[in-house]
Structures are given as structure tokens and as C-alpha cells.
Amino acid sequence: MATQPSDAELIVSLRARVKELETENAKLLAQLADCHSHEMEEKLHGPDGKDRESKEGNKKLEKKMEKKESGYDTRFMSHHSKRYVALKVMYFGKRFYGFASEAQMQPTVESELFKAFEKTRLLIGDRKESQYSRCGRTDKGVSSVGQVIALFLRSNLKLSAINNGNSGVVLDEKHEGEIDYVRVINRVLPNDIRILGWCPAPVDFHARFSCLSREYKYFFWKEKLNILAMESAGNKLVGEHDFRNFCKMDAANVHNYRRHITLFEISPTDVRLRLYNGNQLWVIKIKGSAFLWHQVRCMVAVLFMVGKGLESPNVIDLLLDTTRIVRKPQYTMASEVPLVLQCCEFDDIKFICSSDAGDALRLHLVNECQIYQLQATIFHEALLNCLPLSNDQSLTPFQGTKKKVSHVPLMSRPTEPSYEERRAKLNAIA
């Protein structure tokens, strides 16, 4: 007679299955994107793969297809007045391959936004003509409640005398009688993206270069982490430092790795896991003028090592001393899922939202919260059913399921090539 698996074995099995499904899902998304590209190629070149027309002809055909998909030609909207607008965007990043549409995989947040602009007939001209800019370029899986973009959109306002000679651009700051951008765009966006507000912006505004500061939040479960040690280590990050040991280095495009962190805070939230002996959700808040590629996730990864007692808070001082530590030790970044771009700060940009759009937005977000809460409740029930516990027994997260892995001190690990070595290699290739 076969023996039934223990509770710990069931948890391990369930987690392994979840990882398998996530991997399979990623593969299916990749196949879907590949199928779409093949479909496009067949429409352009025919099923036999041979060119029907010259390259110039194919470009024309591609443009026609784009027009058909969007339902209108943005060039024919040029007779409409337009205004430069900043939009505040939130998105739940789980299903997106990052924010920027330059990513090789789809969907991205940006591609969904431009679909919405076309569907609502708000886009005038192509993306380049729209003078589009974004504040942050968040990675795959990262969410935001305060991303900011800017571009020219169609306007309902009539051109005044001061607008003459400005190619139909509305320069007035008034918004009475204007298109309710929040309401109109949100009607056609997927459920995990929403416009939170809009603001008239000067034509020389740039969502990235006009930004004064960015603030990120990183959520985590406390478990047995030493919060005081993490706080001590995190405070060492505040100030202007060379953060090349806390990022993914892009030597081809980035030559200055000094950044200014203005705020570090770590605090509890009011969320607890009742099943796991009251384990509490905490949040790290980091604010700075700008951030390097993967900088926040690298900083959090080292803070977690400190919180687990694997590294001393003084390891931060060592990693910030780039004259002493010229090569970054190899370590795994923290997960992207709990990271949120919280807000982007600008001068003289005050976002607005009509009462109707605000009511619809709140209703939508409440509904989404309820959906995710229901899903969490179902997983909670599954845990209760597969893990019967006695009254005097409590369960801490992952108890009895994690194998102890020996920790190699950061300063004893293999290192990545230095900036100078990377530059020398790039120059040799060039």
C-alpha cells in the first residue's frame, strides 16, 4: 500500500508545479508572438516566403495593414487641433514584457497604450511626430502606479490667436471643454492598465529629462529578517555614490554610474498572513533623482542578505567603494514582481481627473482588488485542506521545505568584468 506524502512534500510538489506552469506559460506567450510575426510575414510576402513586391512596395503594404488594424490613418487627423499632454499611468506588470515597446516580446505596456490612442482617434501623426517620451523604462514584471508619459493628442479646444503659426497646437493651459482623456482612454485599455490623470504640458516638456525624482517601493514578507540590520545597511545608500556594483552594467551606453539617493525607508504595512503565524508585509521605499538598470533590485538583493544575517551592513560600504571593489561580485537580483514605480516628480505638472472618470476608475480598481482577493482566498482554502494543523501547531512560510544553501560571502565570489574591461572589449570589436 502506497504511503501518502507528508505535508512538507505536498508543499514542495505544489510549488514545483506552479513553477512548471509559469515556465510553460512563458513558452506559450513566446510561441504566440512568433506566430503573429509569421502571420505578418505571410501577409507581406506570401505563404511561399517569396517577395511579392520590392522592399518599397512591402513598406507600403505594411502601412496599409497598420491603417486597417487601427481603423484610421493618423495622417488624416492633421487638420485637428492638438495639445501636448502628460499622462499618469498605472499598470500591473505581471503579464507584460516590460514597459517599452522596443522589447522583442509582446505584450508591452507601451504597445497597449498606443493601441488605445489609435482606437480612440487621439493620436495625430506617427509616434515620432507625437513627440512621445516616457519617464521610466520598467522591466518585465515590474508594476507602476505613477509612470508618466507625454505626447501630442487630439484636442477639442479651438485655436486662439496666440496659437497662430504653431501648426494647430493648443498652447492654452485651460481644460474646460477639453476631451476627458482619462475616461476616453480607460474605456479601451486592458484591465491591468489605467490612466490615473492628465495635465496640459509645455511643448518643451520631456517625461524623462524633466523629471526631478523617482520613487520606488519594494514589498516583502518579514519572516525572520533582521529589519534593524537592513535599515542600518539601507541608510548607507543615501547620498551621491557610484552604484556600478549595484546595477546591470551597460558600458556601451552608460558612462557615469554616480546617482543620488535622497530617501531610504523601511516600514510595515497593515497586511498580515493569518495562516502563517501573522507574517507581516513590509515595504522598502527608495527615492532618487535617477536610477541605473536594475539598480533597485540589486540594492534590495544585498539588503536581504544583510537581513538574513549572511552579510554585515558594512558590505554596503565595501560595494560603494569602487576604487577598492572595481569588479561587481556575482549575485542574483531580487524578484521583479514586488517592485513598483510609485511616483515621478515634476515642476508645475498637476494631474487632473474628472469626477466621472474618477468614479469609473475607483470602481474598476475596487473590482480588480476583489478579483485578486478571491483568488488569494481560494489558495488559502487549498492550503487549509492540504495542511491540516493541530491547534498548538503553527506554520511559518516554507517551514521544512527549504534546503539550507551554504552562503558564499560577496567579497569571496567570482566577479563580473569592470567598466574599463567592458569598454576595452567594445573598442576592440569596433
Image (cartoon, rainbow, N blue to C red):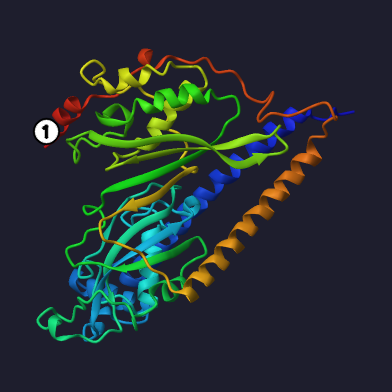
Residue 274 in picture, x, y percent from top left: 71, 38
Q: Which of the pair 369/123 is nearer the observer?
A: 369
- Which element type, helix, strand or loop, lies under badge 1? helix
Identify the residue shown where x is 44% and y is 17%. 311
Image-based side of 249 in relation to 281, left or right? left
The answer to which of 220 and 283 lies nearer the viewer is 283
Quadrant including the N terminus: top right
Q: Who's the residue at 27% across and 34% down the image?
A: 249
Residue 20 placed where, x, y %? 59, 41
Residue at x-position 51% and y-position 68%: 361
Please say if 258 is above or below 76: above
Label 1: how many Cα within 10 Å (few below 14, some 14–19, many 20+): few
Residue 234 shown left or right of residue 347 in the figure: right
Q: Quadrant of residue 293?
A: top left
225 or 12, nearer to the observer = 225
Residue at image x 17%, y 36%?
255
Which residue lies under the disc numbered 1?
A: 427
Tag 1: amino acid: Asn
In this rendering, does residue 150 appear at all?
yes
Q: Position of residue 158 (x, y in %)?
A: 24, 87
Q: Nearer the viewer, residue 400 or 21?
A: 400
Q: Is residue 145 above or below residue 388?
A: below
